[in-house]
Amino acid sequence: MRLALIASMAALVALPAQARQDAAVGDENISLILPVVESARAAPDCGGLYGLAGRAQCMTAPLTEIGGLAELYVGALTQTGWRTAGGGPNQVLFERTRSSGGCDILEMITFYDVELSEEALATAPGYLGFALHTGGDCLPVPAEGETPPQ
């Protein structure tokens, strides 16, 4: 699990070039305004983990609640026009088509401090990191019966 988590951290800032552009383009400017769902708190420093401060917007809750919190965010984001478009372990990719063409990609990852002891994990904070990549190409749509890209 730790290797999958570290790989997800790298994926947060390493989407394929065709699916990523850090500055808004075209006639639509996008800012990431996350809904605050039950039990989540903003974590601007992303827990000081993985160099994500300033590169992702993070929320925190007790580690034991992160899975449920991620599900709440999937529901909240799909209600605001984002559709799930793939992902992997500890990661969900959302996509929204721009009226000017192309897509915005929103990446959500779950993470925690993997250096903590097993005893410390019982009360450790968990995190959700969100990164917005605007104005790039849309993610490939899987063929009938294929699984989405991970």
Image (cartoon, grey):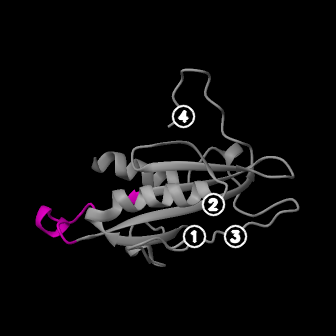
- Asked if one can make out residue 111 in the rendered structure from this viewpoint, the answer is no
**Magenta-drawn segment:** 110-123
Q: Picture coordinates of residue 145 (x, y %)?
A: 54, 20
Per the image, the residue denoted by label 3 is: 31
Task: Identify residue type, mark 3.
Answer: Ser
Residue 1 position (above or below residue 70): above
Residue 43 screen position, x and y as percent: 44, 77
**Residue 116 is one of the magenta-drawn residues:** yes
Could you tell which of marks 4 and 1 lies nearer the N-terminus? 1
Q: Earlier in the sequence, mark 4 or mark 2?
A: 2
Q: Secondary structure at mark 1?
A: loop
The answer to whether residue 17 of the structure is visible from this angle is yes
Answer yes or no: do the residues labelled 1 and 2 have beta carbons within 8 Å? no
Q: CA distance from mark 2 to mark 3?
A: 8 Å
Q: Looking at the picture, which amino acid does disc 2 mark?
A: Leu
Residue 92: x and y in percent read 50, 49
Q: Which residue is mark 1?
A: 34
The residues tagged by marks 3 and 4 sit, at their Cα atoms, a distance apart of 26 Å
Q: Residues within 10 Å of mark 3 (few under 14, many from 20)?
A: few
Crowdedness of circle 2 by 10 Å Cα count: few (<14), some, many (20+)?
many
Amino acid tagged 1: Leu
Left or right, 59 with reference to 104: left
Using the numbered discs, state the Cα–Cα distance from disc 4 to disc 2 in whole angstroms.
Answer: 18 Å
Find disc 2 in the rendering and name its residue: 132
Q: Which residue is located at x 50 percent, y 55 percent?
A: 74
Give the structural element (helix, strand or loop) at label 4.
loop
Specify which label sits upstream in the sequence, 1 or 2: 1
User: For the residues marked 4 and 1, what is the alpha-carbon distance in whole angstroms?
Assistant: 25 Å
